[in-house]
Image (spheres, rainbow, N blue to C red):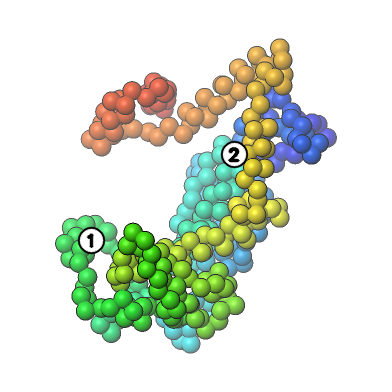
Amino acid sequence: MDIMSEGLNQGERAIDNAPTLTLRNGRSCIPQHYLHYSHSLASVENIIADIEFSDRYPIFVSEKADSLILQIGIVGYDNYRSISKQTGPKIVFGRKWRVERNLPTSEIIQTAFLAIKKAREHEIRELFTLKLDGKTTTPFNNHHDLPLMARNAEILEKPARSDLSFKGSLDLVKFDNGHFSLLDTQNLRNGLAAVTLELNMPHPKMHPEFTSDPIVLLLKSMTPNALLQALIAELIARSDNYVDETFLYRGFARFSPGVDVTAIAQLSADLRQNPETLLGQESCNFVKDFEAERYDTDITRVPQLTDSLYSQKLHARLSEMKLSNFDMLLNAQQQKS
């Protein structure tokens, strides 16, 4: 196999004259910043096919005009109806994540990683319920009318129930039909308090990331609002940590805390060697090709400004900042128009 194509994925090719590095394990590679990317529906599907996470969160790849799209499906039961009244699980779909064709392969993988995290966060926010005045609500869901809330901010600045106690608020909360129990409260320095909770769920084996350990919250005040805000933040954090540990690409858990930080740093340093050191006198041609490739890529990512009032204000603000690459932005605008 040609050394220039060895180890490259579909949709990748080395920039002309790119140097080849030898890693500390003796293997050769061309660093990703020395590659040109031209992804297609097929190449992105091949990338996603190497990702392992959960059958409950399938990753869909589609194509629309000049864009490639990633989308997470969520398989489960309707959060707003009793499971006993449902004929079975169904699939719903998260937001669409646009993937540029010249996006590095690693960033496509990370887009899928982030999309899974945000799909799970969306689900967690809807599974967190608070019973108020006989009605079951989802105060942390993403579907509240934000413009309406902003117009009426004064009604959201004080508790709707001033008689609600700290422990009383916990009694009104459920998470996916699970109940929280207060195990311990400790007052710390600087007005902080540590509150320990336990989540009791009907099917704990289905939710190991939430039920395996007690939930410890650090609160700045012993108020119902501080408790509920800290609780949803901890549930989301646990979900994110679970994805970190179980999201695999070709069997490798890149984002797991088990991956050594200093080893990552060492690999990064090894891959960022000066091309002149690697290529000697031949580096001139490569550096020229590399800079041209990087410029062409940067140009494709410059957003289009219009003659709207908003664009004019944005243009004025950027001009005041005296950005070193602002001329490039203006040139890109002229080329697009």
Name the quadrant of the C terminus: top left
Q: Where does the image place residue 42, in percent across and percent down from the top left?
A: 64, 47
- Which quadrant would the N terminus be assigned to in this image? top right
**Residue 95 appears in the rendering:** yes
The 10 Å Cα crowd at callout 1, few under 14, some 14 to 19, many 20 or more, is few
Q: Position of residue 147 (x, y in %)?
A: 24, 57
Q: Which mark is residue 317?
A: none
Q: Amino acid at mark 1?
A: Met
Q: Tell me which residue sits at (81%, 31%) in the image.
A: 2
Residue at the (27%, 59%) spot, across then down:
146
Residue nearer the viewer, 84 or 272: 272
Residue 244 in the image: above or below residue 126: above
Residue kind at label 2, given as amino acid type: Pro
Residue at image x 65%, y 45%? 43
Q: In the rendered view, does 243 fall on the left or right side of 3? A: left
Image quadrant assignment for residue 165: bottom left
Residue 299 image point, x, y percent: 47, 28
Whether residue 36 is visible, yes or no, is: no
Residue at the extreme top of the image, as rendered? 281
Q: Secondary structure at mark 1?
A: helix
Q: Which residue is mark 2?
A: 104
User: In terms of depth relative to the viewer, which is nearer, 191 or 47?
Assistant: 191
Q: Residue at x 60, y 17 (%)?
A: 288
Q: Earlier in the sequence, mark 1 or mark 2?
A: 2
Q: Nearer the viewer, residue 191 or 336?
A: 191
On the image, the x and y values in percent for residue 186 come to 40, 71
Spot the residue most to the right. Answer: 1
Q: Would you say 326 lies left or right of 294 here?
A: left
Q: Tag 2's secondary structure?
A: loop
Answer left or right for 157 relative to 104.
left
Q: Which residue was labeled with disc 1? A: 149
